[in-house]
Amino acid sequence: MAKPNPVEFMQQVRQEANKVTWPTRKEVGISSIMVVVFMIVSAIFFFVADSVIRWGVQTLLSLGS
């Protein structure tokens, strides 16, 4: 396969970049807010799950002593 020269390569890159559908500022803002919300929800979920598991293990270990 022949390598294109640098000028042809940059032209091809520009053509491909023009085909991309870039998100609007509003879409980026909404997506960012959704990421933060899901991050907070998952942090709360894993905190609660960890607390329940820790309580269960401590309970089981205290039965043996």
Image (cartoon, rainbow, N blue to C red):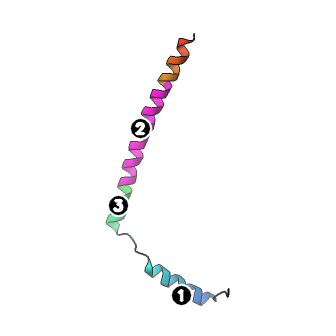
Disc 3 crowd rating (10 Å Cα; few below 14, some 14-19, many 20+) is: few
Q: Residue at x 36, y 48 (%)?
A: 37
Segment tinted magenta in the rendering: 34-54
Q: What amino acid does circle 1 point to?
A: Gln
Count of residue discs: 3
Give the Cα separation between the discs numbered 3 and 1: 31 Å
Q: Is residue 56 above or below residue 28?
A: above
Query: Badges 3 and 2: C-beta atoms under 8 Å apart?
Result: no
Q: Is residue 30 left or right of residue 18?
A: left
Check residue 45 in the rendering and tell me which mark sits there, or answer none: 2
Q: What amino acid does circle 3 point to?
A: Gly
Q: Residue at x 63, y 88 (%)?
A: 4
Which is nearer the eye, 2 or 42? 2
Q: What amino acid does circle 2 point to?
A: Phe
Q: Residue at x 41, y 38 (%)?
A: 45
Q: Which residue in the protein does label 3 denote?
A: 29
First reached walking from the N terminus: tag 3 or tag 2: 3
Q: Which residue in the protein does label 1 denote?
A: 11
Name the outermost residue toward the left.
26
